[in-house]
Image (spheres, rainbow, N blue to C red):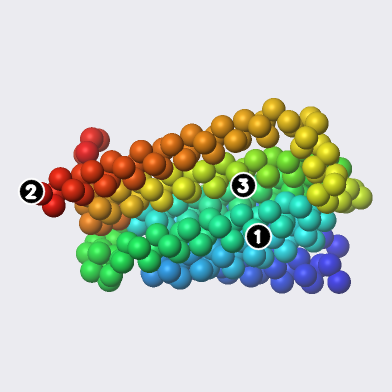
Amino acid sequence: MITLGNYLALSGIIFSLGLVGVMTSRNVLKVLLSLELLLAASNISFVAFSKFNGDYAGQLIVFFVILVAAAEVAIGLAIIVVMYRRLSTIQADELKSMKW
Amino acid sequence: MSPYFFYLFAAVLIFASLCVVLARNPLYNVLALVVAIFSLSCLFILLEAYFVGMILLLVYAGAVLVFFLFVVMCLNLNTVTLSSPQQSRFRVLGSLVGLAFAASFGLATTSFIKAQYMEASSIRGTIETVGKILFTDYLLPFELTSLLLLIAIFGIVSLAQGALSTGKDTENL
């Protein structure tokens, strides 16, 4: 029998993996991909709580999270492209100045 | 039947997430995230959240991650730009923080005793049921997301224009 606890444990594992990815990678693209993992982990919790509490609000919040994540990815990738054109690298350590 | 599917998709999801974090080549990172999103969508369908599962598949795996692939290929990243001479200073610290988070999540999940006994409700997140709530109770946030997407489009256009104009400047120099 799969309980709410199983889904929450899975969500915790994925969140921790994403957090390690965000903190350890120097590649900006990889940081953005790990951020997607963090959002996916929270989505698992939302949908699992929605199912086990009998409330649709969790699924609607996941819908909004997907929309916001799409906008965030679009802006983030645009920033990465600009960064690659200016610095010809996508290593986070190369971003030393606060201003272009 | 359902428990085996849960463990199968959970295992695929964890393995794909590990690949996202550990793989060297950005192309493999993106493809691993596609696999992760696919298994996540399968988990949502196991939870009878059909609408959200399909949206995740279409919007995430179909649009967002293909966008990622386009950028990875456009940037023409070779091994010289990717290989870093020294490892990140935060590698050990980041792994420790991740482990601490995992431990605290494990503690929180096991101490949340009620989670083991809660019965799954009979709600089914079909397009009909979710759509009804989306267009009644959640109409204002739904309309506001269009504003958010519009602002995102403005941001991208202004970033791209700035990049184009500076590209011309450096060419002239």
- Residue that label 2 marks: B173
| Chain at tag 1 | B
* Image depth: mark 2 or mark 1 in front: 2
How much space separates mark 2 and mark 3, taking CA atoms?
43 Å
Residue B57, labelled with which disc? 1
| Chain at tag 3 | A
Quadrant assignment for the C terminus of chain A: top left
> Which element is circle 1 on?
helix
Residue drawn 54% across and 39% down? B149
The amino acid beneath tag 1 is Leu
The amino acid beneath tag 3 is Ile
Q: Mark 2 vs mark 1: same chain?
A: yes
Asked whether the beta carbons under mark 2 and mark 1 sit within 8 Å of each other, the answer is: no
Using the image as rendered, state which of residue B36 and residue B151 is in the foreground. Answer: B151
Quadrant assignment for the N terminus of chain A: bottom right
Residue A80, labelled with which disc? none
- Residue that label 3 marks: A66
